[in-house]
Image (cartoon, helix red, strand yellow):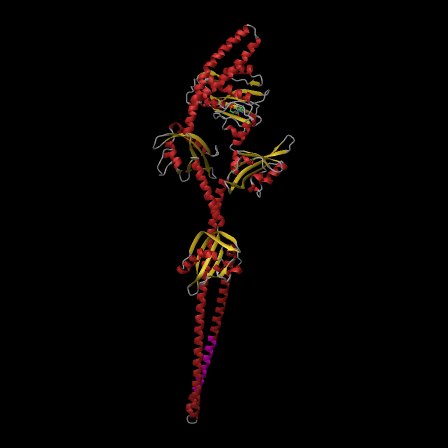
Amino acid sequence: MAADTRLTNTQQWEALYTYKHAIALYSTQDIILEMANDAMLAFWGRDRSIIGLPLDVALPEIKDQPFVSMMREVLNTGIDNIGKAIRADLEVNGTLQTFYFDYEYRAIKNAAGETYCVMHTAEDVTEEVLGKEAIRVSQERQVALEREKALNEELASANEELNAINEELKETQLRLSDLNNELEERVLSRTKALVLSEAKAYSLNEELATTNKDLVSLNEELASSNEEMLASNEELISTNEELNDTQRILSTTVSQLELSQSRFQNLVREANIGIIVLVGEDLRVEIVNKTYGKLIERSVNELLGQKLFDIIPEAEASFRPVITNVLLTGETLYLYDVPYLVYNNGNKIEGFLNLVYQPYIDDDQSITGVIVLCQDVTEQVHAKFKLESAYDQLRLSKEAAQLGFFDLDLVNVTLEWDDRCRLLFGISHKDVITYEKDFINGLHIEDRERILSIINTAFNKSVSNGVYDVEYRTVGAEDEQLRWVRAKGQVYFDDKDTPVRFIGSVLEITEQKEDEQRKNDFIGMVSHELKTPLTSMKGYLQLLKSKAQKNQDVFTANVLEKSNNQINKMTTLINGFLNVSRLESGKIYIDKQVFNIVNLLKEIEEEFIATASSHHIVFGSVSETIIYADRDKIGQVINNLLSNAVKYSPAGSTIKVACVTADNKAMVTVQDEGMGIDPKDIDRLFERYYRVDSNNMTAISGFGIGLYLSSEIIERHDGTIGVDSLLGKGSTFWFTLPVSQA
Ligand code: ADP
């Protein structure tokens, strides 16, 4: 229950300090922290002892962050600075942590328009931002992995191309040497033939003298031998041509090979993935690119031709065994998120890598080394760690808050409940659960229709923004226990406004509800007990008043009249409390009768015109309207709306009361020219004990039960109650009731 006392200065400050939204105030060019409430201090992980210090002394870690100069700018220009998801690195619990805040720096000005302080409000959105970051990192990682895969494939196909060209080259060389052999043989055999023919000619010449016939035949033989030689020469020429052709093929093959090799080298040099080729027992660097060099902060020239582990001996223990393994098995090895730590001139260089080790295969198919591809994934791994710790924090705070979670996937029609959520519906198993069987059946029969209709509304994008905030009872599926639950959630829509997902949390509030019940019982009892003495006091006062009037004691009669008014006020208040407690325990009775609302309004008009002289109250003319309702309770509602109009609008302003009928509904309106209501408060105005939290309200007393009672009464008459309001301009409260058909 709220206290009915004015706040002291300290209490006002305390209220600000304990207000759940983070606030702080700063002044002067030094940005002195004049005030920071507990919520703000909690963001910073500090206590109130830092108040009074310049902000950058209070939070030394923000020295190189932009906040102090941003505030100074607001102070000097008088222009507010409002922004979303700004990053702040704060030392909370001794460690520097990154947070993201939606913030407002507002210039607070004096009457002369000078800014004399900056008001800072903030909301922690770290979790949202990290969630987005995690998705981005995982997408980037996916892209990087795909790029790596594509590069691998390109390398493999370049290797294949090289191998094919090598094969071709070998074949060509073989053919070439065959041709050479053949050529040699032919030259040799022709030379032999020639020598033989000459020898023959010689012996024939000797025989010339003896046989002419022989001469002729010898001549013929010579001629044929000549012919043979000619043919042999021709053959020689054609063999030469063939040789030339082969040489041409050889030279194009060689230039193709060079082209392919330079392509391969370019590929390696330009790749934004680190590539190093190590050959031989001692793992000398045969090929390396700039990207690899960068990873260990060395230039390509420093590395080429060197033994890798002479340069980074500290990495040998972890990486040599992997390389040995690849050399032995000839199998490609993939490693992910591998930490590495090397030194350069005493500077520590560390990070995380995704690695691919491929055997480097020589012409004769033997493994002579390894090709290592390295991708720097340090940032991704760090983000992953951060995300894991954020999830841990979330899990811990969820456990500490005893929150249960639900997730309804409307596309695949699946429902997920965590253990806590299951517990609140009296379910101990971990089997699949469904919306119909477990959720709907688990709702208390008296709450079922109301909750399902609220959910249906939340699923309808045209009438709701998907926000869900309700209280209901469950009856345990296994233990049949009754539990009170507060559920909050959000419905997500696709681009066609179809609801696709419904996520939220549940909290058990059985104990609070029971406390409330006890409190209501107590209020009911006390109010009831107070009523009797008040009634008799009223009677005595009236007696005294008529006596004083009889004695013409005007002064006493006046004082008694005032006392009577005070007692009336108290009676209204106590009746209010009594009604609330009756409502809560379902003991409010509506006693309906047929009556003309015109007469009721007339009575109220007379009463008000007599008592509320501070305002112009104008009752519009009303045509006869017969309704079937509880006359007293409807009177109470109108009285309440009218007293609020008087309470929340300045003296001398006008209040208009009217009643019109349309579509078989009578609508009563009470219109004022008062302070009006902020749209953010309108939805909650009709809640029990709800009062608007604003500066204008501090001087106006109340308990926030009038509108609650009014709305309960109207609802029980199948009517509607509401308000249209403009902040600073005024409000029109209205309610409708069905017109009696009889
Ligand atoms: P109470 O007036 O006792 O605080 P009510 O339930 O009657 O309780 O009203 C709830 C709140 O609604 C009030 O505290 C006030 O902030 C706001 N309110 C009600 N009527 C008006 C009005 N006519 N103009 C502005 N604010 C109003």
Foreground of the two, 512 or 225: 512
Foreground of the two, 202 or 16: 16
Q: Is residue 664 visible?
A: no
In the shown orientation, is residue 551 left or right of residue 515? right
In the shown orientation, is residue 441 left or right of residue 494? left
Q: Is residue 344 visible?
A: yes
**x, y (%) of residue 176?**
45, 72
Instruction: Using the image, determine if residue 255 lies above or below residue 709.
Output: below
**x, y (%) of residue 287?**
49, 61
| Residue farthest toward the bottom in the current orientation of the protein | 210
Q: Is residue 237 magenta?
A: yes
Foreground of the two, 590 or 487: 487
**x, y (%) of residue 455?**
43, 32
| Residue farthest toward the front in the current orientation of the protein | 49
- Tell me which segment is drawn in magenta: 219-239
**x, y (%) of residue 495?**
48, 39
Q: Quadrant of residue 112?
A: top right
Q: Is residue 495 magenta?
A: no
Instruction: Using the image, determine if residue 590 lies above or below residue 38.
Output: above
Q: Quadrant of residue 23?
A: top right
Q: Quadrant of residue 118?
A: top right
Magenta region's main secondary structure? helix
**Label tally:** 0
Foreground of the two, 98 or 421: 98
Q: Residue at x 47, y 13 (%)?
A: 535
| Residue farthest toward the top in the current orientation of the protein | 551
| Residue farthest toward the right in the current orientation of the protein | 112
In the shown orientation, is residue 612 left or right of residue 594? right
The C terminus, quarter of image: top left
